[in-house]
Structure formats: C-alpha cells, structure tokens
Amino acid sequence: MNHPHLFSPLEVGPYQLAHRLVMAPLTRMRAARPSLAPRPLNAEYYAQRATPGGLIIAEASPVIASGFGSPGVPGIYSQAQVEGWREVVDAVHAKGGVIFLQLWHVGRVSHSSFQPGGGLPVAPSAVPIPTDLKTMTADGRVTTYETPRALRTSEIAGLIEAFRSGARNALAAGFDGVEIHGANGYVIEQFLHSHTNLRTDQYGGSIENRVRFLMEVTEAVIAVWGAERVGVRLSPYGIANGSGEADPMPLYTHAIERLNPLHLAYLHFIEPRSSGAGRAEVNWQNVPSAMVLFRPIVKGVLISAGGFTGDIAEAAIAEGHADAIAFGRIFISNPDLPRRLQQGFPLTPYNRKTFYGGEAEGYTDYPTHDAMEPA
Ligand SMILES: Cc1cc2nc3c(=O)[nH]c(=O)nc-3n(C[C@H](O)[C@H](O)[C@H](O)COP(=O)(O)O)c2cc1C
C-alpha cells in the first residue's frame, strides 16, 4: 500500500482535494474602510494562492460588529461584506480552488474603541488579558487591554445567533464551507479555558459546561451548512492572547469526543510550538504536539498547522499524525507554495513588517518561482 503524502488526494466532506497543502487562515487587515468588506486587492491575493483542488481557509472574519479586535479586518455580517467576499470566492473558484471562511469573535481580545457604542468588550467573565500584552485601539494607539464585561446568561444565545448568521452570510457569498475559530484565545477558547471562564451558570465550571458554548455554536453553524462543510479550529496547549489551560488533556479530550459524532469536515489544530505566530517570531521546541497527542482520538480528517516545513509536513502525513497540513507564514511569501514544495524550489522569506495592514506590498507582490527565474 502506498502511504499518503502531501500530494496525495484527500476527501474533505464532499470535496476531493488534489493535495494536502492547505492555506491557513491569515489575518492581513486589508479590507475596505469603513465597510470592512473585501475588495479587489483581497481577491487578487487569494486567487494568487489558489490551486486546482487546493483548500484555502480565508482569514478570520467577525460575525458581528462586537467581534472585532483589530482595524481593517473583513467582516461577514453586512451585505457589502457578502458581496466583497463573493468576488474573492469567485476568483478562487475560477482557479479550481476550494475556499472556506473562518468565523470569528474575539471576545476580550478587543477594545472599547472597536465596540458599537464604545462599551466594554464582552467575554465569558470579567477577566482581563495580562498587562504585559498590548493591543491597538481602533485609531492605532498602543495600550493595555481593558477588563471585559461578563456576558449575561441571557445574552449568550444572541452570540450563538451571530455565528449562525455569519454562517448564513458565508453561504450567501458562495463559500464552500466554514471553519469555526475555537483557537488562539478568542471568545470560544475563553469559554473553554478555566482561568477565563469563572461562570457559575450552565456555560462555566465543569469541563462539560465550558465546552457547551463551542458545541452550541457548532450546532448552529451545522444547521446552516451541514456538518460535512464545517470545520473547527482548536489550539490545545496554545497560549495565544493570554490563554492557556493548566491541564489541557481532559478538556480537549472531552471537546474532541463531543465533536467526533457530528462528522465534521475536519478538525484543525494549531501546534503549540507556534502559538502566537501571528504576533512574534516564535517556534518553541520541547512543547507537546497537539496532533501526536490527540490524533488517536480524532475520528475524521485532521489538519495540523504551526511551524511546518515541507519535510516536517511530509513526515507528519507519512506517520499518520495528520491528514493535511496548513501553512501560514510561508504561504504569505510564496503564492505558489504547493508547486515550490512539490518541486523542491527555494522559498522566499516573509517580511513580518507587512503582515498586518497596508496595500499590495508584502501582500500581492511576492513573486512566483517562475517569475523569479532569470529570463
Ligand atoms: C499574519 C498572521 C495572521 C494570522 N491570522 C490568523 C487567523 O485569522 N486565524 C487563525 O486561526 N490563525 C491565524 N494565524 C495563525 C496561522 O493560521 C497559523 O496557525 C500560524 O501562523 C502557524 O503556522 P505557520 O508556522 O505555518 O505560520 C495567523 C498567523 C499569522 C502569521
């Protein structure tokens, strides 16, 4: 029997992927303002990275105005945003690609300057992010995080509804599926982790209660899309945005065992060695591997991300630790990443300074390998 490798096909829900090299969700803060709708530059960027039968997970997109924590991030709650995303989706489909949208709410990783009406950000509990981490206000000032306002029990259904309507909007925009952002210290992870969830209602306390919000969001999104077009992203052992669970094993074991019977399109892990990659140049070693620890209990497709090179990705797939690998930073600087890895071409290094915000520089101006060849 031939072992699968990066360039073997893979079934993900109803889609037959031609290879296992996925574009990770990447916030780039280049939406139109003030509509926060994707614009032609964004469509060009995604089309550059689309391959026939290749899966792209489009950047995290707030499902409601209270879900923002950074300027220039595209939303998925207004008609203009749906129309902007449709242009992106059409451009990726024109190249034969498959594209999911990541649904987002940042919870406490926000600031009152982003909040409609200027109120405090909402979160499961009024626990602030430690002051050594800084955030940016809507007008670009660097500051510490505020103490969020704890959601009343009666408000939680509304937040779940926001995910449902974001899912509906993604469907209207023509996406092939959606990914629920349950990672990196944002609102779903704030419910999951015990130090950010001090609730005494049915959404806090026991592991079962802390997993409830994730499950209710997932069920709402499945009601729109069907499970086979819904993925969930988790970061067990991650410490992004002041998150982190002292003993993640029982929590994530329970979450995975609850998600398994839903038959999702996939589960997507971020390896803890790259937790915080969005903010800094990190690749910690000697930390547990999420895919190695949890693969034995994941039923269905497992995508892993975080610090992968082509060789490490090949090994992970050959050893059965993951079915597909999502690439973030090197997909930013190598629009033709699948071809480069397949051919063993050298990679263009990324420029961290142009990750967030701006125009074409560091976004659509990274050349393909062929364009770099001397004439
Ligand atoms: C610029 C940048 C933006 C990111 N935005 C998101 C995001 O919107 N959603 C998400 O789940 N992860 C996000 N991440 C994390 C990446 O998806 C990925 O997990 C991480 O970069 C590790 O993979 P890599 O080592 O291949 O870069 C971001 C990372 C970077 C560098």
Image (cartoon, grey):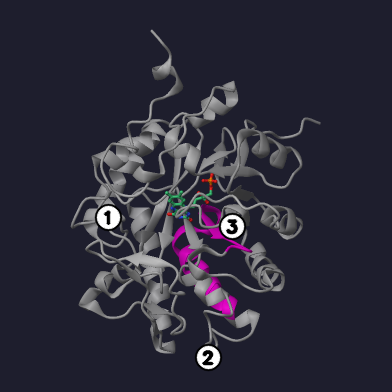
Q: Quadrant of the N terminus?
A: top right
> Which kind of residue does numbered mark 2 sit on?
Asp
**Residue mark closest to the camera, 1 vs 3:** 1
> Which quarter of the figure has residue 107?
bottom left
* Contact, mark 1 vs mark 3 (Cβ under 8 Å): no
Q: Which residue occupies 57% across, 28% down?
A: 341
- Does label 2 point to a residue whose CB lies under 8 Å from ligand 1? no
Q: How many numbered badges does the structure rendering display?
A: 3
- Residue at disc 3, secondary structure: loop
**Residue mark closest to the camera, 2 vs 3:** 2
* Contact, mark 2 vs mark 3 (Cβ under 8 Å): no
Crowd class of label 3 (few under 14; some 14 to 19; many from 20; radius 10 Å): many
Q: Which residue occupies 64% across, 80% down?
A: 207
Which labelled disc corresponds to residue 201?
2
- Residue at disc 2, secondary structure: loop
Q: Compared to 65, does 173 lie above or below?
A: above
The x and y percentages for residue 363 are: 34, 38
| Residue in front for this viewpoint, 240 or 84 | 240
Crowd class of label 2 (few under 14; some 14 to 19; many from 20; radius 10 Å): few
Q: Is residue 341 magenta?
A: no
> Which kind of residue does numbered mark 3 sit on?
Leu
Rounded to the nearest angstrom, the CA distance separating label 1 from label 2 is: 35 Å
Say which residue label 3 marks: 264
The x and y percentages for residue 15 are: 54, 42
Q: Is residue 222 magenta?
A: yes
Label 2 or label 3, whichever comes before in sequence order: 2
Q: Which residues are magenta?
A: 210-238
The x and y percentages for residue 217 are: 48, 70
> Which kind of residue does numbered mark 1 sit on?
Gly
Q: Quadrant of the C terminus?
A: top left
